[in-house]
Image: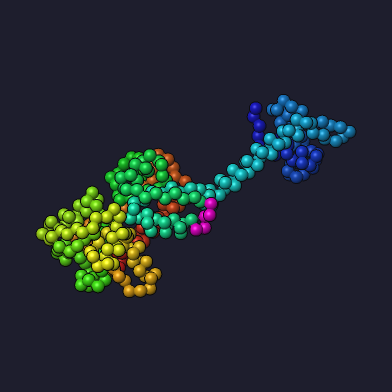
């Protein structure tokens, strides 16, 4: 059986209006065209749908039954058309995002909030994972977008890389806060809060201290940088962290309208802390996911530019 949408819509209109001529006027077609469509439908169904009685068009019992089926099909089609139109207009869809812990607490939720504010039907799933886990999730196409430390290139995902660096967070009252940059010599035997020893930034920091001949004093080991800010506020240590954590902390301080309790300074020699946006290579992402990729790229670029310009 090879039914067309036009046949179903024409049949429904004939049933509603009760005549071929009225249906033709409503559909903007000729009476012969409508009659031909109904005849073709009857041939496909191998059923007689209408009888002529004293010049009147009378539906058969089979037509009454088939009307329910035709209505359901056409209604489902209209729903699908609205849904697809909503997807094209970025009104519907789903975003599955996986981010590293340092970005999943404030940065990604804030970006997602801004992005979906005018998209009430877009559903969001946000997961916090390690960079290695995010790589695997994106490679396996289980998430639409990953935000992770820059990985080695792989065939299973595409990436947009952002070359960033680490900052040093200090109590605002510390004498070192007056310096434009912070070096290992400045932090000689100074209590530090750092990410765990397996993290790539930890290895770079340790190398910088060794090269400078400065004493390395790690007091706090962290899984994510943001909790370390509380130790810095308490005057217990300095924190060496990524630009995103530093930027979000500065913005929160500005909103608080009070004097900053923490200052951020560039750490020299430079410690790389680069991030990437990852998307699956072998599965096209949705329109709304691509739009969020563009939005997220702009936000990360803004942070990088702002932190470099501030020199803080």
* Residue, far left: 213
- Residue 150 position within the rendered picture, expressed as x and y whole percent measured from the top left: 30, 49
Is 2 on the left-hand or right-hand side of 292? right
Q: Quadrant of residue 58?
A: top right
- Residue 191 position within the rendered picture, expressed as x and y whole percent measured from the top left: 19, 62
Q: Quadrant of residue 28?
A: top right
- Residue 12 position within the rendered picture, expressed as x and y whole percent measured from the top left: 73, 39
Residue at 23% over, 65% down: 236
Residue toward you, 279 or 72: 72
Q: Does any portion of residue 312 appear in the rendered image?
A: no
Is 197 on the left-hand or right-hand side of 93? left
Image quadrant for the C terminus? bottom left
Q: Main secondary structure of the magenta part?
A: loop
Residue at 65% over, 42% down: 75
Residue toward you, 47 or 6: 47
Magenta-drawn segment: 117-121
Q: Is residue 84 magenta?
A: no
- Residue 185 position within the rendered picture, expressed as x and y whole percent measured from the top left: 14, 64
Residue toward you, 167 or 189: 189
Is 51 on the left-hand or right-hand side of 79? right
Image quadrant for the N terminus? top right
Residue at 71% over, 36% down: 68
């Amino acid at each position: 059986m090879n039914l067309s949408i036009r046949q179903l819509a024409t049949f429904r209109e004939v049933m509603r209006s009760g005549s071929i001529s009225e249906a033709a006027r409503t559909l903007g077609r000729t009476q012969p065209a409508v009659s031909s469509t109904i005849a073709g439908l009857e041939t496909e169904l191998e059923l007689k749908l209408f009888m002529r009685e004293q010049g009147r068009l009378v539906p058969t019992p089979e037509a009454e039954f088939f009307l329910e089926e035709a209505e359901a099909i056409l209604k489902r089609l209209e729903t699908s058309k609205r849904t697809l139109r909503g997807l094209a207009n970025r009104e519907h869809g789903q975003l599955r995002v996986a981010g590293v812990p340092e970005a999943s607490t404030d940065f990604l939720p804030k970006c997602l909030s801004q992005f979906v504010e005018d998209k009430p039907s877009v559903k969001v799933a946000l997961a916090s994972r390690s960079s290695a886990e995010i790589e695997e999730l994106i490679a396996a196409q289980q998430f639409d977008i990953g935000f992770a430390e820059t990985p080695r290139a792989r065939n299973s995902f595409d990436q947009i890389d952002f070359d960033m660096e680490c900052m040093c967070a200090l109590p605002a009252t510390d004498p070192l806060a007056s310096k434009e940059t912070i070096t290992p010599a400045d932090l000689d035997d100074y209590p530090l809060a750092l990410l765990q020893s397996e993290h790539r930034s930890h290895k770079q920091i340790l190398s910088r201290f060794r090269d400078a001949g400065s004493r390395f004093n790690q007091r706090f080991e962290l899984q994510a940088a943001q909790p370390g800010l509380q130790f810095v506020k308490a005057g217990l240590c300095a924190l060496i962290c990524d630009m995103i954590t530093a930027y979000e902390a500065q913005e929160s301080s500005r909103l608080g309208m009070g004097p900053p309790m923490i200052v951020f300074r560039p750490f020299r020699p430079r410690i790389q802390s680069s991030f990437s946006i990852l998307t699956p290579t072998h599965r096209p992402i949705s329109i709304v996911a691509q739009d969020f990729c563009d939005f997220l790229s702009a936000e990360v670029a803004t942070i990088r530019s702002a932190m470099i310009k501030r020199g803080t």
